Amino acid sequence: MEKKAKADSYYRDVFHRFTSHRLAMVGTVIILIELLAVIFLPMVMELDPYTSDVWAFNAAPSKDHILGCDDLGRDVFARLVYGGRVSLQVGLISAVISLIIGLPLGLIAGYYGGIWETIIMRSADIFMSFPSMILILVLVAIFGPSVWTVTLVIGVLGWTDFAKLMYGNVLSVKNKEYVESAKAIGTKDFRLLVKYIIPNSFAPVLINFTFRTAGAIISESSLSFLGMGVQPPEASWGNILYAAQSIVVLSQRPWLWIPPGILLVLTVCSINFMGDGMRDALDSKMKIRK
Amino acid sequence: MSDNVLLSVKHLTKNYVSKKSFFGKPLSYVHAVDDVSLDIFRGETLGVVGESGCGKSTLGRSILRLIEPTSGELIYNGKDLRGLNKEEMREMRKKLQLIFQDPYASLNPRMTVLDLIKAPLDVFNIGTHDERIERVLEMMKLVGLTEEQMNRYPHEFSGGQRQRIVIARAIILSPEFVVCDEPVSALDVSVRAQVLNLLKELQAKRNLTYMFISHDLSVVKYISDRIAVMYLGRVVELATKDALYDTPLHPYTKALLEAIPLPEVGRKRSGMQLEGDVPSPINPPSGCYFHTRCPYAKDICSKEKPELKEGRPGHWCACHFA
């Protein structure tokens, strides 16, 4: 029993290092609060992001509408909560899609080399040589804007990051002596990849995952801001900001664009802080900070 | 004598392509190991010495087929290792092990000592979970580690202790033949002797055959029964330890022995000293590879390649004048 408990001590150390990283903890708390809010607030409060309050077009914050209303009289707070669902979901799912495509490809390119390397890495170069925003706009125009097309397009186009990262890591890890020593004891390829190469490339991939999530949230917001992303009446932080394209809104109705703007910045920063914290925590050579 | 041979290396060669044309056609090669033939006897320690870059490590790795040799035969217990397919070779690795130079690099930082030493058992699916742990503990005790250290990670250990972990992993499958690739070069002088003695002790207890690669003549002298001297990918002299140190035949060996620093005040260098650098293995000199630096070189040396001949019984040398 005791042996088992001790074997987990690496992960306990990682956890400990992560929790003692101040900024990472701040980020984690903010993200947790956001997640809890967007998931549970609609259940406990009466939030309606779609119905117009005909008495409250462009209304300033008040007791009824704590963050005011937009030009169609819809409650901004309710739209922020529902928009948060969409934005966080797009961010996470598209990062997962990028990871699922990019990780194995990078692994294969790096480990087997040769023709695999040429095909995979050169396609990555080709993908990366397109200005991604234009490509995304074109694809969204072809497939029609919706939450799922946006998620899919951002996710699929993000594979190059993971592939390049994994490729580079595999190249450096596979020439390490411990990999050679694993070969010397007769370890098969699959086991070598799973037990030696992936765990030793895991930290940068995880960190990149957080940055990718943050990047995807920004991409989604940019698209929605341009009107090519999530389509009204459905809300996302980006298309709430869409309103700020008008100079009147920008100068006279700050409640329409400051809250989603702050939320975006806060979310992206928090995710990046979590990434930094994870990097330090996963480095087994780091001493635990007192 | 010949049934005592555990491993017979015949004309082993390893070339690397060093330059390719635009279309990928090889233009020049590095001759890392060049036509090496030697026998390794059961239970002995064969030392391999040479300057850095002379192909000692490549030789060791080619013998285990961790680097695929370009040509040659590796007759192990009467079977040619190079004739084995991937799966048969994998099975063979139970008998053939390698101890690495740098214990800081040769242990996976993400695995505990238990998992590290247990890895060969996991790979070959030997025994139940509990049996494996028992076997690991037995090995740890054998190499001088304590049971409490089982769940620690390699970075928590000193160099000497890590090398003990590496050794424990190498011998857990009860191999017959272990290539030790500079196992003590990365260690402090103070722990070198401990690790060397551990290797010797294990050899006696478990009937191991070692190929001990090192650039350190004193270490090789301490541990080896026979010694092979390598220069530019070739074996230039092969003899028992005493014969090699007392009556070296090859001028290169003489120069190497001369270069050992002795703690003696006012000692004069009597014999020869080497000048110049080792020639490039991409364009090795013609004839005897050593003739460019050899003080005794004659015409024939630059024209004809000397064969490794048995000058005296059991004492082989590749020199026209030995």
Image (cartoon, coloured by chain):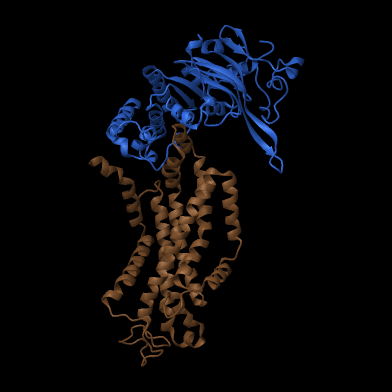
Chain colours: A brown, B blue
From where the camera sits, is residue B268 visible? no
Towards the viewer: B48 or B257: B48
Instruction: Describe residue A109's horizontal placement relative to residue B128 as left or right.
Output: right
Say above or below: B133 vs B11.
below
Q: Quadrant of the C terminus of chain B?
A: top right
Q: Position of residue B216 (x, y in %)?
A: 53, 24
> Which residue lies at the image location 31% right of the left edge and 87% below the top edge?
A64
Say above or below: B313 vs A45.
above
Going by the picture, which residue comes out furthest to the bottom? A55
Instruction: Describe residue A285's horizontal placement relative to residue B13 as left or right.
Output: left
From where the camera sits, is residue B314 visible? yes
Residue B113, quarter of the rendered image: top left
Q: Position of residue A156 (x, y in %)?
A: 50, 61
> Which residue lies at the image location 60% right of the left edge and 53% below the top edge?
A122
Towards the viewer: B36 or A235: A235
Q: Position of residue B309 (x, y in %)?
A: 63, 11
Q: Position of residue B268 (x, y in %)?
A: 61, 16
> Which residue lies at the image location 31% right of the left edge and 36% below the top edge?
B150
Say above or below: A10 vs A162.
above
